[in-house]
Image: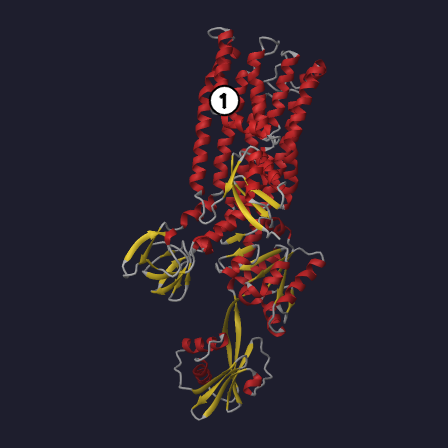
C-alpha cells in the first residue's frame, strides 16, 4: 500500500487567482491526490496523497504552467524573488506607458481640437502601431499566458484581458471593411492599465509577505567554529554539523539552534517571543538560531541544522498557514472557477444582443448619456457591439475576488508571527473568530509552572527559619520541583544548611535522612506519619522529626501576573472562561476564585480533558483550549481551536493550531483580536469584490462603460483589496 505523503511544488507562470484555480483543479484530478492547495504569492503548491511526482508535473504542464519540486532543505530567498517580480512588473508598465502616452496625446488632439496630424489615415496607423507594440512587447507575458490557458481549456483572467485588447486592436484593421470606429488606441490603454494594476498588485503582495522575508533575513550566513586543532575558522552556516562548537560574540546572531557549553550571556529573543526584553542564558540552556547574543562571548554546541531549526520551522509554519484556505474561501473559489467561462459566454451574448437588437440596446444606453461623458452613441451597431463586448471582457475579471481571502490571510498570519503568535492553520482564524468558550489548563498556563513556598506552618513550636534549615538540608539531595521550592526559599532567606547523612529517596512519597541522631523526613502525610486540620489552598509538604510532625510547607504554583488581566479582558469581551486541571479541587477552586473564572473542572486526567471539551461542544459552544504541551494534547486536538503555550520547544511546535511563542497569556487576547480583525478584512474584501462585479457587469453589458474605464476600475478593485488587507498592520496589540 502506498503511503500518504506531502509534496511541495514550485509553480511558474501564474499571474492571478484564475491561474491558481486552474493549477489546483489540474492537480486534484491526478490519481492518488487527496488535496492540493496553491499559493500565488509564494508560487507554491502543496499536494498530499499517494500520487507520483512525475504525474503532478505532467498535469501542471498540460495546463500551460511550469512545475518542479520545491527545495525544502533551506528556505528560498523570497525577498530576492519579490524584488525581481516587482522590477519586472515596473519595467513592463514603464515601457507600455512609453508607447501609450504618445497615442493618447494623438487621440486627445483629435478629440478636443478636431485635428488629425498629419492626416486621419496616418494618425490611425500610428496609433495602431503604438498599441500593437504595447500589446505584443510589454504585454507579451499576458498574451502568452492567455494563449497557454486557452489551448489547454483552462481559461484564466489573462484570457479576458487578451481578448479585450486584441478585439480593440483588431478594429484598427477591420474598419476598412466594416463601418466601425477604430478602438486600436483603447487596446494599448487597456494593456497599460492592466500592467499598472499588476505592478501595484505585485508590490502590494510583496509587502503582505514581509513577515516571511524578515524571518528569512534573520539567519546568520556564516558561523565561527572550532576545528580539530581548536582553532577558530569561519564556515558557511549550511556546512554546520551537529556536535560542532560555535563561537558567538557580543552583537552576533547565533547561527543555529544549540546548547550553551561555556559562558553566560544576555540573549535577544524578540524574533521568537515578540518581546524586546532580553533574557539571561547560562551553561546548559538552549539557544535559538537567529537570536542575538547581546553582551558577551559564549560557546554553543550545534544541536539542530537546516530544516530542523526553530527558525526554519517557523518559516514553514507561516507559509503553510498562508497556504491553507479559510472555510469562507471555498465559496469564493467556486465562483472564481466558473467566472471566466461565464464571462466569455456573457461577452458572446453581449455581442449578439447588440447585433440583433441594436436600436433597443442603444435606446437603453441613451438614458445614461447625460451622466457619463465618455458615451458615444454615434457608433455603428457593429461598433457598439464591439464596444460593449470589450468592456464586458475587461470589467468582469474576478481578480479582486480571488485576492480577497489570501492577501488578508497572508498579512494576518505574518503579523501574528511578528508578535509571538504562530498560526499553523490559516483556517483557525475563522474558527477562532467564532469561539465563545475558552478552556485553560492550570500549571504552566494560568500559573508559572514553578512551585513556590506560599507559607510555612510551625506545628511544635520550632521557629520558622529552623524548619526551613532542616527541610532544605535534607531536600538539597532531591531534584523534585517541590524540593527545589524549599531550597530556593532557604537561599532567599540566606539560611545556612546543616549536614544530613544516610539519605534515602522514596519515589513519589518523599525523602529521609539522619539529622544528628534523629530521623528527619520530608514528604507526603503518609510518608511522614503526619496529618493536618489546617485549611490549605496549596499543596502540603510535611516535615517530621522522629515521625512527629513539626512543620508544614504550603506550596503553590504562583499565578502568572498576566492571568488576572487576560481573564478579565476575555470575560469583558463575552467569552466564557473555564479551568480544567488535574490538581485537587481545593487548589483549583482557590485559583478560580482569585481569577474569577466561570467554571472549574478539577482532578481530571489528560484524556478526560478531551471529554470535557467535547461536552461543551455538544452544548453548542465553539471551544478553544489553551494548554502547555503534552498532557493537554488530547484536549487541544479535540478543541475547535487548539492554543499551545510554548517557547520554541519541539512539543510546543507540534501541538495546537496557534502557538504562543512568548509564553505570554495576554497573547490569547491578542490572537483573538488578530483573528477578528483578519476575518473582518476577509469579509470586507469579499463584499467589495462582489459588489464591484454586480454593479459593473450590467453597466458594461448595456454599453455605458468605456473599456478603458472598465480596465481602470478592475485594476483599482484589486489594488483596493490588497491595500485593505495591508491595513491589518495598523492593529495595536
Does residue 414 appear to the left or right of 704 in the view shown?
A: left
Residue 124 or residue 666, whichever sits in front: 124
Q: Quadrant of residue 25?
A: top right
Q: Is residue 202 above or below residue 276?
A: above
Name the residue at 63% across, 21% down: 389
- The x and y percentages for residue 335 are 65, 36
**Can residue 695 be seen at all in this image of the molecule?**
yes
Q: Quadrant of residue 356?
A: top right
| Residue found 37% across the figure and 53% down from its top | 239
Give left or right: position of 59 versus 246.
right
The outermost residue toward the bottom is 517
Query: In terms of image quadrants, where is residue 699?
Result: top right
Q: Residues within 10 Å of mark 1 (few under 14, many from 20)?
A: some
Q: Which residue is mark 1?
A: 136
> Colour scheme in the image?
secondary structure
Provide the secondary structure element on which disc 1 rests: helix
- Identify the residue shown where x is 49% and y is 22%: 136
Q: Give the vertical position of 192 relative to 593 (above or below).
A: above
Among all residues in the image, which is located at the extreme front? 1
Q: Is residue 115 visible?
A: no
Q: Nearer the viewer, residue 386 or 474?
A: 386
Total residue callouts: 1
Residue 565: x %, y % from top left: 55, 60
Q: Is residue 594 above or below residue 213?
A: below
Q: Pick the residue in front: 79 or 471.
A: 79
Residue 402 versus residue 118 in the image, above or below: below
| Residue at 62% from the left image edge and 46% from the top image edge | 32
Q: Position of residue 176 (x, y in %)?
A: 58, 8
Amino acid at each position: 500500500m502506498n503511503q500518504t505523503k506531502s509534496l511541495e511544488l514550485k509553480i511558474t507562470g501564474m499571474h492571478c487567482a484564475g491561474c491558481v484555480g486552474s493549477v489546483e483543479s489540474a492537480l486534484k484530478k491526478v490519481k492518488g491526490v487527496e488535496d492540493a492547495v496553491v499559493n500565488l504569492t509564494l508560487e507554491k503548491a502543496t499536494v498530499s496523497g499517494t500520487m507520483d511526482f512525475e504525474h503532478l508535473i505532467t498535469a501542471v504542464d498540460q495546463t500551460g504552467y511550469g512545475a518542479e519540486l520545491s527545495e525544502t532543505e533551506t528556505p528560498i530567498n523570497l525577498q530576492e524573488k519579490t524584488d525581481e517580480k516587482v522590477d519586472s512588473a515596473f519595467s513592463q508598465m514603464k515601457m507600455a506607458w512609453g508607447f501609450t502616452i504618445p497615442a493618447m496625446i494623438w487621440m486627445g488632439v483629435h478629440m478636443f481640437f478636431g485635428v488629425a496630424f498629419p492626416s486621419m489615415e496616418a494618425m490611425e496607423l500610428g496609433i495602431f502601431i503604438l498599441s500593437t507594440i504595447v500589446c505584443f512587447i510589454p504585454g507579451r507575458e499576458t498574451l502568452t499566458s492567455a494563449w497557454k490557458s486557452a489551448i489547454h481549456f483552462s481559461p484564466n483572467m489573462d484570457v479576458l484581458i487578451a481578448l479585450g485588447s486584441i478585439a480593440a486592436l483588431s478594429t484598427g484593421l477591420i474598419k476598412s471593411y466594416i463601418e466601425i470606429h477604430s478602438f486600436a488606441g483603447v487596446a494599448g490603454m487597456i494593456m497599460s492599465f492592466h500592467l499598472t494594476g499588476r505592478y501595484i498588485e505585485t508590490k502590494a503582495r510583496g509587502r503582505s509577505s514581509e513577515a516571511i522575508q524578515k524571518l528569512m533575513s534573520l539567519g546568520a550566513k556564516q558561523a565561527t567554529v572550532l576545528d580539530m586543532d581548536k582553532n577558530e575558522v569561519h564556515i558557511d552556516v549550511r556546512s554546520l554539523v551537529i556536535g560542532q562548537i560555535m563561537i558567538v560574540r557580543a552583537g552576533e546572531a547565533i547561527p543555529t539552534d544549540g546548547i550553551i557549553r561555556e559562558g553566560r550571556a544576555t540573549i535577544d529573543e524578540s524574533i521568537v517571543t515578540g518581546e524586546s526584553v532580553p533574557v539571561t542564558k547560562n551553561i546548559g540552556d538552549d539557544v535559538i538560531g537567529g537570536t542575538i547574543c547581546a553582551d558577551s562571548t559564549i560557546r554553543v554546541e550545534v544541536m539542530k541544522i537546516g530544516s530542523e531549526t526553530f527558525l526554519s520551522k517557523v518559516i514553514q509554519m507561516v507559509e503553510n498557514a498562508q497556504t491553507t484556505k479559510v472555510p469562507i474561501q471555498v465559496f469564493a473559489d467556486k465562483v472564481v472557477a466558473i467566472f471566466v467561462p461565464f464571462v466569455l459566454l456573457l461577452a458572446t451574448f453581449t455581442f449578439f444582443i447588440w447585433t440583433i437588437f441594436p436600436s433597443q440596446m442603444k435606446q437603453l444606453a441613451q438614458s445614461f448619456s447625460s451622466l457619463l461623458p465618455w458615451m458615444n452613441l454615434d457608433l455603428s451597431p457593429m461598433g457598439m457591439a464591439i464596444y460593449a463586448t470589450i468592456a464586458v471582457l475587461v470589467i468582469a475579471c474576478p481578480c479582486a475576488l480571488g485576492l480577497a481571502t489570501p492577501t488578508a490571510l497572508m498579512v494576518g498570519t505574518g503579523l501574528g508571527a511578528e508578535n509571538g503568535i504562530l498560526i499553523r492553520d490559516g483556517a483557525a482564524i475563522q474558527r477562532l473568530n467564532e469561539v465563545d468558550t475558552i478552556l485553560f489548563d492550570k500549571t504552566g498556563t494560568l500559573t508559572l509552572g514553578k512551585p513556590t513556598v506560599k507559607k510555612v506552618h510551625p506545628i511544635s513550636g520550632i521557629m520558622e527559619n529552623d524548619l526551613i534549615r532542616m527541610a532544605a538540608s535534607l531536600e538539597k539531595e532531591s531534584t523534585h520541583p517541590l524540593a527545589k521550592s524549599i531550597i530556593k526559599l532557604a537561599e532567599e532567606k540566606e539560611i545556612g544548611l546543616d549536614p544530613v547523612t544516610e539519605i534515602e529517596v522514596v519515589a513519589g512519597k518523599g525523602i529521609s535522612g539522619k539529622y544528628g541522631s534523629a530521623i528527619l523526613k520530608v514528604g507526603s502525610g503518609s510518608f511522614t506519619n503526619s496529618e493536618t486540620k489546617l485549611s490549605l489552598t496549596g499543596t502540603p509538604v510535611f516535615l517530621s522529626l522522629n515521625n512527629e510532625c513539626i512543620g508544614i510547607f504550603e506550596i503553590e504554583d504562583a499565578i502568572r501576573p498576566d492571568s488576572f488581566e487576560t481573564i478579565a479582558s476575555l470575560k469583558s469581551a463575552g467569552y466564557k472562561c473555564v479551568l480544567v486541571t488535574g490538581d485537587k479541587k481545593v487548589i483549583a477552586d482557590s485559583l478560580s476564585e482569585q481569577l474569577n473564572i466561570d467554571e472549574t473542572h478539577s482532578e481530571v486526567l489528560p484524556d478526560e480533558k478531551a471529554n470535557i471539551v467535547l461536552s461543551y461542544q455538544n452544548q453548542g459552544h465553539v471551544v478553544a483550549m489553551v494548554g502547555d504541551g503534552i498532557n493537554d494534547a488530547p484536549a487541544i486536538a479535540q478543541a475547535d481551536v487548539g492554543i499551545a503555550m510554548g517557547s520554541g520547544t519541539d512539543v510546543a511546535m507540534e501541538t495546537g493550531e496557534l502557538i504562543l511563542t512568548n509564553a505570554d497569556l495576554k497573547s490569547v487576547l491578542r490572537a483573538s483580536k488578530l483573528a477578528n480583525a483578519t476575518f473582518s478584512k476577509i469579509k470586507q474584501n469579499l463584499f467589495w469584490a462582489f459588489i464591484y462585479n454586480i454593479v459593473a457587469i450590467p453597466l458594461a453589458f448595456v454599453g455605458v462603460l468605456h473599456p478603458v474605464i472598465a480596465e481602470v476600475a478592475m485594476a483599482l478593485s484589486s489594488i483596493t483589496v490588497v491595500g485593505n488587507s495591508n491595513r491589518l498592520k495598523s492593529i495595536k496589540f
